[in-house]
Image (cartoon, grey):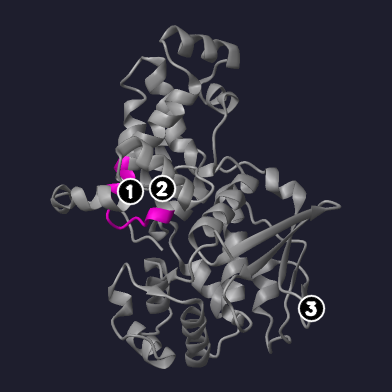
Amino acid sequence: MSGAPADRCKIPRAFWLAVEHIGVPPAALLRQARLPATLHLNGQGLVSTAQFFALWRALEELTADPGLGIKLVESAETAVHPPSSLAAFHARDYRDGLSRLARFKRLCTPEQLHFSEQSGECTIKVEWLYATEPEPAVAVDVDFATLVELGRRGTGQRLTPVRVEFQRAGPQRDAHRSYFGCPIRYGQSRNALILKSADLGRPFLGHNPELLELLTPALASALGEIQARSAIREQVKIVLKRSLASGRPELSDVAFDLGMSERTLQRRITDEGSTFRELLVEARQELGRQLLSDPSAGIDEVACLLGYQDTSSFYRAFRDWEGVTPNQWRERNLGHLGRRVIAGVSVH
C-alpha cells in the first residue's frame, strides 16, 4: 500500500456539533465507543479506521434511528467544514465539486471515492483502505447524503440520484426514500450511489471568488490582492492560488478566469519576463508558506490544497524551495505562529 494515506482519521468539528444537535453528549458517545473521553476537545485528535467505525457503531447503539445519518448531514452547517473539503462547495460545477472532494480524501484520508460512468449514470462507491469489517450503516448514509447534499447546496436545486444501493436489509421506515427521492434497493452486493451524469455539469451558484475567503486566511489575503495589483504576473498568481486545490491549473483555465485568450495571456506573461511555469511555482511557494502558517492544517492537507498528487511530491518541492521540510519550516517559525490569531475551523 505504498503511497497510500496513513490509517488515521481526524474527527471534524462539524461531527461533534451535529452529534450535540441531535441530543447525544459527546462524552457519552465516546464512553460507548470506548475511546478517550477528551477526544472531542482536541481538534487534532486522530483515530484509526477501526476506532472511527467504533464511533459510528456507538452512535447507532445510542440512537437506534435508521435515518440518523441523513439527519446529521442535513443539520451540518457548510461553514464548519474544514478548508480542504469546503473548497468543494465553491467548485465550478457538481462534477468539479465531487472531484475536489474525492481528491482530498485520496490524499488525506484512508477513505477513497471511486467513480465510474456509463450509459448516462455515474456510480460512486466508497472504499476504506484499512477496514477489516463492513462500514457501519450510519457512516454509509453520511457518505452518500454528503455527496447528494453537496450537489443540492451547490446548485440550489433538489437533485435526486437515479437510485441508491445498500448491502443492509431494509429499515422499518424508509427515511432514505424521503431524503434521496429515488428508488432504494436493499440487500444488494454493494453500497453504491448512482447519480445522473447530466446533473454533474450543473453549475454551482457559489462559484464566486469572494466566497473562497471562507477557506483560509491565506486565501482571503490572496484574493484581496487581485484587485490591488495591475501586473499580469500578480493577477495570474492570485488566480492560480484559488485554483490549485482542484489540481494543476492550465494556462487555458487562468486565461478564462481573467477574461482573455490564451495567446494574449501568454504574450503578456512573456512581456513581463516570466513564464507560466515560473508563476505556478511562485504561487505554490507563496500559498504554501501561508497555509503552513495555520498550525491547524495538516501537511497532507496543505499538499492537497496546493494541487500535488501526493504528499511526498510536496515534500520534495518544498525542500527545493526552502532547503528544509515543511515540518522543519513550521518548527522554525513556531514563535511567530504562536503570536498569530488564526481564523477558521478545525481540519480533519
Please give the residue where the numbered disc 2 appears in the rendered image.
315
Q: Earlier in the sequence, mark 3 or mark 2?
A: 3
* Residue picked out by circle 3: 189
Asked if disc 3 and disc 2 are in contact, CB closer than 8 Å, the reply is no
Please name the residue shown 46% across and 77% down the image: 48
Disc number placed over residue 325 in the picture, else none: 1
Residue 244 among those drawn in magenta: no
Under mark 2, the amino acid is Tyr
Tell me what residue is drawn at x 53 percent, y 67 percent. 110
Comparing 257 with 53, the one in front is 53
- The quadrant the C terminus occupies is bottom left
Instruction: Find residue 312 and report its horizontal and vertical position in percent.
Output: 46, 51
> In x, y percent, where is residue 42?
29, 72
Q: Return the residue found at the far right.
A: 119
Q: Is residue 227 left or right of residue 123?
A: left
* Image marks 2 and 1: residues in contact by CB distance under 8 Å: yes
